[in-house]
Structures are given as structure tokens and as C-alpha cells.
Image (cartoon, rainbow, N blue to C red):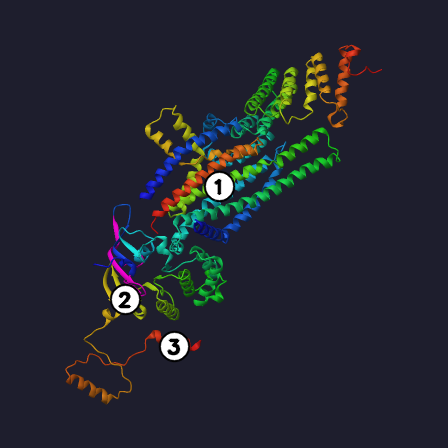
Amino acid sequence: MRYRLLALALLVAWGAGKLPWERRLAAERQVVMVGETLPMSYQLRDRLGQGLTMAALGGFRGLAADCLWISLTGAWEEQEWERVQALAEVCVLLQPRVVFFWEMGAWNLAWNASEAVTRAPVPMGRIDRRRHDAMRWIEAGRSLLERGIRVIPERPTLYQKLGDLHWQRLEDYSKAAECYEEALKRPGCPAYVERFVGFALEKAGRRREAYDYWRRLWGSVSEHGVDQHRWGVVEEHIRDLEAELDVPAGERLFAPAR
Amino acid sequence: MIFKKNWKKDWAVCANELSKLYPVDWTQKRLHALDRLDLYVRRGEVFGLLGPNGSGKSTTLKLILGLLNPSSGSVQVFGAEAGTLEARRRIGFLPENAYFPAFLSGREVLRYYGRLVDLAQRKLWKRVEELLELVELTAAAARPLKTYSKGMLQRIGLAQALLNDPDLLLLDEPTAGVDPIGARQIRDLILGLRARGKTVIFSSHLLEQVQEVADRVAILHRGTVIQEGTLEDLLSVREQTQFTVSGLAPVARERLEEWLRGEGAEVLEVTHPRERLEELFIKAVEKRR
Amino acid sequence: MGNSLRHIYAIATNTFTEAIRQRVLYVLVVFCLVMLGGSSFCTQFDFRGDDFKFMKDLAYAGISVIGLLVALLGAALLIPAELERRTIYMVLCKPVRRFEFIAGKYFGLVALLTLFVVLMAGIFFLALWGHESALTGDILAASKGRPTELQAQMIAEYRAAAYDPALVQALVLLWAKLCLVTVISVFLSTLASSTVFIVCCTLLVYLIGHLQSVAREFWLEGTVAAAWYTRAFLAALALTAPDFQTFNLIDEIIAGNAVLWSNTLPVLGYAVGYAVVALALAALVFEEREL
């Protein structure tokens, strides 16, 4: 009995000692995964079935999310958009730090769902209803992306996707350009996004800014021979804008074509 | 009892007022396995613990080993507290119905246990082969233990008890379930150890076997010693005498009986001695070998 | 000291040998091969961008499941069996300390776990390599060796995701987590002697361990009013159970987030600390146990 009491005392002493240690580890983990906060895990407990919660908390959260995503694919095939949205929300709740769930969830809502409702038959005289529904799905996708960006602010992908959304779904080209620029500030952003900023500015009608942007881009490297990066396209746009904006010959980057 | 200063060292084992209680259930009910048992075993003697099942033989052995802690009282082994490493270094133990890791071969199991008694590798391997030879298992040494017969397992058990060349050997029912030939080998082994000055304590309920090897015995009943002493003291019936004669004619027998009666003696029994079944069995089998 | 280590080593190797020679183990090996084979089939669930997330999730969940089986059953099967068959007498009647027996059992099981994790991880990395080279091979074949900007980007992304060195960190963390489960099971084996009971209790501690952080914060913050017994219960949970959420870094690594060794090492240190204390507790309890 004496040793057992000693063991109990040791356990409690260790327990008291380990608490600050655990809190520090939790804080460090928080830095790694900004998205996971305590309220989140309460929320999680409320929203999922008991068994799934256990699995999710028991270290099999990744696989649970994957399985839900597979069923989301099924919902998508059956065009059940409400279910697609619900499943996407659960996936990002389970694994908020997985870019893919935010990105593809938003793509399903803002592109697939909104396109589908635009083509869906509606009662006579209620064409405005279509636009309303489509808009609702686009907004849902945008909300998903914006929340994702708050959780994973350091990756370019969601900014790029948000730029695409503003461009393709909302036709807000200035906003798109802003998003692309934000994406470019983050490491790992594909190089072609550089050109998207210029295209977006042109589409927005901000030609002077677009011209300045193209020139800055051109000046950022000295070697323009790499075919892969399509410097030819950039050159073409600069030439067109120089002509259109009537840039004085001395300030031009390229001599006007004869 | 008054002993000289270092008295405890003269004994291989001395148990003083040893009690052991086992809790039976969650309530405070207790089972008295041993009740103030006193037991003294001299160095170099073969000591038999007798008693019916549940009389406390195994408990006594476990207390000597330190596998159990006494509820009260104490046990010393060569002057050291039972259960200490110092005490255990000098003990070899063969449990009742010894069970071994069945996935190992005979040789592997001895090497495993040999590492636990701190034999250096080269010495250990030599010792293992010697012991396999001693218990006649060299031929089966590479086979897994699950293919061994009961007698072979008991012999492996003996071999592992001898690994550390112990001064005190504790054998719990060493001959239980072993055939007479195996039992005799074990008996011979015990006698051989005694000749080398080792102390042996063994428990048994086969009284004949105890009779053959033990110098002293203690009879346990319900956790206490009810009889203790040398076999001579315990067994000889001093007021009776037995003759065994060969070539006595019936007429001569009658005259002899008459003469004895004339001397005032009462003839209780006149019989032909019968061979013991065990001896018959051993003779018969050994002829075939 | 030297003797102790020799004894622990002898008992550990014996435990490992015993486990290896059990037939159940081969069933597990076959199961793990089937599962990883299944995982390469499951890559049909191509998550478009494919950072091999599904494959990684499946592999790590598989290693978790099999590792948990080994960790839960190892001690719970071997230690009570040793007591029941009384083979333990043969060990403890020798000049072996009881803590050496406990430590030997534990390290034998850790060796077994290590073998399993390494084996399964090896198969997983092979499968990952196969999948990655198939994907990039397709792209390269389609572009006839001259990938466009977009294709080059994709290949780079595939390779970064497949050959992420942090995956090794995740593996080490998973291994440490399983070792922690094992030590809990060893500790419980010194208290109880029924395999089913030990397995259930270990599983319970495993699940509670994932909620420990919630209990801990609830108790320490104390912002929510609760009855004293609720608080006492939470305190008991927080004080005794390990915080398994600490190992959630594994999720982050699979999600492709930057997790550095400087994040991983403190967690490993925590696991080692917990294991040492649990082993000490086990030794204390076992010291008094009647055999």
C-alpha cells in the first residue's frame, strides 16, 4: 500500500508539473495551426455525431475529413448543392489547415452550384430568382475563401482563387487584381499570377496602372528569353498600352512598330 | 531459543513466526495461508516439506524467494533478508508445474535465464551445454519447448534452477506428473547435490519419495508445522522389530514363532515381502533400454 | 547498473522474440500489406490538385490503427499471461529487480512497435514514390519532355508534396504517440490482471487523452461556473491523462504546413517525460504486487 500511495503522490506531482508544459506545447502548436482554437473544438463537438467526434479527436480526423469529401463528390454529382455546402463546411471544420478543402469547397459553390441554378428551370416570370440564387452560391463560395484566408493567411492559393472568383463570377476586376497581388506576396505562388494582375487592371479599365505594372514586371528581371514565362505576351501588352496611352517616344520601353 | 551471535548464518533458511494472509474478496475476509510458522533448515541438508494440498507449502517457498511479502514475521536466507538480490543470487527455484516460454527452444530458454543470473556470455554458453548434458536434453535442445513432454519440461526446469550453481535449491513438487524413472533421476540429482554440500528444500505429497531422500521433514497443516524432525525420529517404531529372512522352511518358521512366544514377544504379522511396484516398473523398463 | 541494463536487455529481447513468434502478428502484417495496397487503389479518389493528402491520411491512419492494436494488445496480452502461466516466477526468483522486468517488457514492446512502424512506413513511402512518378511521368509524356509553365509548376508541387521531409517528423511523432499508449498499457498491466480490462482501460485513457486539453483549459481557466465535483473531475483528468492533442502536429504535417523539428522535439520530450514517469509508477505498483 505504501508504494501505491507513493505512486499516487508521484502521479499528482507529475500532473501538476506537466500542466504548464502542456499549455506551452499547445501554445506552440497554436502558432503552427492558427486555425485551431478552443471554441472550434467545442463547436466541433456540437456539430458532429458522437462516434465521429471520437474518431476525429482520436487522431483519425484526416481520414474522416477525406471520407466526407468523397461523399461530397457524390453530392456534387447528384447536384445536391445544400449537401455539398454542408459537407464542405464540416471538412474545413475538421481540418481547417487543409487548403484543398477551402479551395475546392468554394469552387463547388461559387462555380458549379451557381452555374447549375442559372440553368435550372424556374417558374415563369421569375428569372430574377435565378440570378438571386446564383448570387447566393457565389457569396457562399466567397465567404468560404475569405474565412479560409483568415485561417491560412500565409499561402497564396486561396488568394489566387479569390482573385479568380472576383474576376470570373463577380466581374470585379479591381478586386481581382488586389487578390492576385496579395497572392504574389506569398511564397510558392505560381509565376503566371504575375500576368493576371496586369490583365485584371486592364479589364478594370485602369490602363495607366496596368501599364506601370507591366513595366515594373518587365524590369524585375534582366533575362527575358525564357519561353516558359511568356515574356512575349508581356511585351505585347506593353506595346499596346504604350500606343493606346500615347506614351512619349522617349519614355517608351519598346520602339513603336513600324 | 538462545543462539550464538551469528546464529542466522549457520542456517540456510530460518523463518520466524511467519504469517501470510490472503485477502479473499473486497470485504475484510482473509485467508490464513500461513500462521506463525517457524522453520529452520540447516546448511547441507535435504529438507522435505510435506502436507496436503493447501497446507501452505508453496506459500512458504514463495516467501523464501520473496515473491510474496510476509504479513508478519520474517525469513532469512543465509542470513540475508528473503527477496533481496543477495538472497536470490544463491537460490535456484523450480516452481510447481513449471511453465516456460513455449516459443523458445530448450537451449534458448536456458540462455535467456542465464543472462538473468549474470553469467558472462562465454561462461553461460558452456554452462548451458553442461546442464543440458546433465538433464539429458542435449538431443532435444534445439526443439521448441512446446514439443517437450512433461518430464522433459521438468528437467529443463531443474536445469534452469541450477544455472547459477545455487547453494539452496527450492523444488516445488519436483516429481509431480513425472514418470518413475524421471522421478528417480530427480532423486539422484538431489542426492548428488547434497553430496556437494548444497541445501535442498522440496515439497511433495508423495510421501515415499520424500522418505527416500529427505534428511529432515516438516509436516504442514493449515499453515503451521505439526511435526518436524529427522526421518529416523519420526518413523521408527522402537517397540517393534522386523526380520527379513530367506530360505526359511515352514517347519523352522513355526518353531521360531513358538520360541518368540516363549520369550514373551507377540508375533503381529508374518508375511512374504513384496516387491514395490515402483521398483518392479523401473527394473522392467531398464531391462528394455 | 550494468547488470540492470543487461537484465532489461535480456527481458526486452525475450519479449520481442515472443511477440515475433506469435502467429497473430503475421495476420497483422498481411492486413497492413492489403491496406497499403488498397491505399494505392484509393488514389483513384484523386483530389484534383493532389497533394497526396488522401494517401497520406490513409497511410497514417493505417499505421495508427495497427500500431494501436500492437500497443493496446502487446502489454495486455503478454504481462497477464506471464503472471498467469507463472513464467514470471522463473524470472523474479533470479537476482532480477522488478522494475527491470517492467522496463524489459516495455522496451521489448517498443522494439516491436518500431519494427511495425518502420515496415509500414517503408511500404507507404514506396507507394507514394510510385504514385508520384506515375503522375509526373504522365505529364512529362504528354508534354514530350518540354513542360509548359503550368505543367512545370504542377510537377514541382507533386514532388514537394511527395518528398516532404516533414513526413519523417510525422512518423516519429506517431511512433512516440504509440509508445505512450504502450507505456500506459504496461502501467495498467501492473494494476490489473485481466486482458480485456487492461485493453478497455488503455483505450479509455487514449480517448480521454484527446479530450485532456479541453478538461485542462476548462479547469484552469475556470471561467464557466461548475459544481465542485465537476471541477474535481476535470482536475483529476487534467492531472493524470496525457495530452494526446499534442501529437496533432501530425495532421499539420500531412496538410502540408510548415512544422519544424523545433516544433517536434519538445513534443517528443514531453512523450519521453511522460513515459519515464509512467514507467516509474508501474515499477512502484509492481514492487508491491503479490505474485
Q: Is residue A19 above or below residue B273?
A: above
Cβ–Cβ under 8 Å for marks 3 and 1: no
Q: Which residue is mark 1?
A: C178
Could you tell me how far apart the alpha carbons at marks 1 and 2 are, in whole angstroms?
55 Å
Mark 2, chain letter? B
Cβ–Cβ under 8 Å for marks 1 and 2: no
Residue A187, how many percent across, how many down? 63, 26
Residue C240, how many percent across, how many down? 39, 36
Mark 3, chain letter? B
What SS does tag 2 mark?
A: strand
- Mark 2 is on which residue type? Arg
Q: Relative to the observer, which residue lies in front, B93 or C70?
A: B93
Left or right of C194 in this view: A55: right
Which label belongs to residue C49? none
Mark 1, chain letter? C
Q: Is residue B47 above or below residue A60?
A: below
Left or right of A178 in this view: B274: left
Name the residue furthest front. B5
Left or right of B232 in this view: A213: right
- Mark 3 is on which residue type? Lys
Which label belongs to residue B216? 2
- Mark 1 is on which residue type? Leu
Could you tell me how far apart the alpha carbons at marks 3 and 2 are, in whole angstroms?
28 Å
